[in-house]
């Protein structure tokens, strides 16, 4: 299954992001904590360059906690700050600002030494669709949205938002990339809801989800659907059929597939991370089912 989705407005957004980067001090790159790598647009590394950035791991309440800690460590090893948050509940938001202030301390110290009065940090919010950018912004501004006035960037799809005295945020539309080199990335984006369901074959996504869950989180899968050890190792189509029967869908596998995708996506099967961190997982103080 190949998933492709690159509307024309996203090509325009990419150009605009490139043009507006010179106006900001720092980039807030928002990703889904369940897919910290797959939800990072590879185009952004080229666009952002050496500009300071904070990777914001949103929806961390849905992700495997050990994996999230490991990803934070991984990004740190790459010289990039990363902060887990739950934008929906406002958790971790202050940590984002603390990290931004730390990264920009030298710059602002130099400005003060030249007699330039302190000003708000100017940041750009960027990320793929459906990683929670709107929720993040609403939490930052506490519903008091205000454009900062006569500045470049106040265009359709991009606007400056004044967030108290500390932050001015340039919001940008979500940008997907034109081609997924790895088909697995498309499936991960689909399973977590970053791509519109109308573009998907839900049975393929459900089978992918079942495969991931039984590989990395078999206890959670077994518990949710009352599966025995023998049933867990069935061929994937047979497993889908079995779960359909257990949930009373009989031969309506389309509805069963939609149910499975929804339950995985919404955390009904428990926390999970689809991108496995390429570093040693922390063990202290954490338990994983």
Image: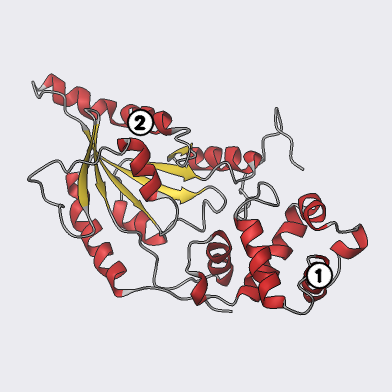
Instruction: Using a 10 Å C-alpha cutoff, classify the residue at mark 2 as few (fewer than 14 neighbours), some (14 to 19) or many (20 or more).
Output: some
Residue 58 position (above or below residue 221)? above
Q: Nearer the viewer, mark 1 or mark 2?
A: 1
Q: Say which residue appears at 77% left-offset and 50% top-offset.
A: 220
Q: Residue at x 70, y 32 (%)?
A: 286
Task: Report the residue at 72% width, 57% height from top.
Answer: 213
Quick one: 30 or 183, which is closer to the camera? 30
Question: In this orientation, which residue lies closer to the viewer: 146 or 172?
Answer: 146
Residue 87 at what x, y percent from top left?
45, 41
Residue 93 in percent (x, y) is at 41, 33
Q: Secondary structure at mark 1?
A: helix
Q: Quadrant of the C terminus?
A: top right
Residue 128 locus on image (x, y percent) = 40, 58
Q: Residue 19 or 59: which is nearer the viewer? A: 59
**How many numbered discs, if any?**
2
Please state, as top left, top right, bottom left or bottom right, where the N terminus lies in the image: bottom right
- Left or right: 97 in relation to 131: left
Residue under pointer 2: 97
Q: Residues within 10 Å of mark 1 (few under 14, many from 20)?
A: some
Per the image, label 2 sits on a secondary structure element best described as: helix
User: What residue occupies the far front of the structure in this picture?
Assistant: 248
Q: Tell me the residue that label 1 is attached to.
A: 239
N-terminal-most mark, 1 or 2? 2
Q: CA distance from mark 1 to mark 2?
A: 46 Å
Q: Is residue 119 left or right of residue 197?
A: left
């Amino acid at each position: 299954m190949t998933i492709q989705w690159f509307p024309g407005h996203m090509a325009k957004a990419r150009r605009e992001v490139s043009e507006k980067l010179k106006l900001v001090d720092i980039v807030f790159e928002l990703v889904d904590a369940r897919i910290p790598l797959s939800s990072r647009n590879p185009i952004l590394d080229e666009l952002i360059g050496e500009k300071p950035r904070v990777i914001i791991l949103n929806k961390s309440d849905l992700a495997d906690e050990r994996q999230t800690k490991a990803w934070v460590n991984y990004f740190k090893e790459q010289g990039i700050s990363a902060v887990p948050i739950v934008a929906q509940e406002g958790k971790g938001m202050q940590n984002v600002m603390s990290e931004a202030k730390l990264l920009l301390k030298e710059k602002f110290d130099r400005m003060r030494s030249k007699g330039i009065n302190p000003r708000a940090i100017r940041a750009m919010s960027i990320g793929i669709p459906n990683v929670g950018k709107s929720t993040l912004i609403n939490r930052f501004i506490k519903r008091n949205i205000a454009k900062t006035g006569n500045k470049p960037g106040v265009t359709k799809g991009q606007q400056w938002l004044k967030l108290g005295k500390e932050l001015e945020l340039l919001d940008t539309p979500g940008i997907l990339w034109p081609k997924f080199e790895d088909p697995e990335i498309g499936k991960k984006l689909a399973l977590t809801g970053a791509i519109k369901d109308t573009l998907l074959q839900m049975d393929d996504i459900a089978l992918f989800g079942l495969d991931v869950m039984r590989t990395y989180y078999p206890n959670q899968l077994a518990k949710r659907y009352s599966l025995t050890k023998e049933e867990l190792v069935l061929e994937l189509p047979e497993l889908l059929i079995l779960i359909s029967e257990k949930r009373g869908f009989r031969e309506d596998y389309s509805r069963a597939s939609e149910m499975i995708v929804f339950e995985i996506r919404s955390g009904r099967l428990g926390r999970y991370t689809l991108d496995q961190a390429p570093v040693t997982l922390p063990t202290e103080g954490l338990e994983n089912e």
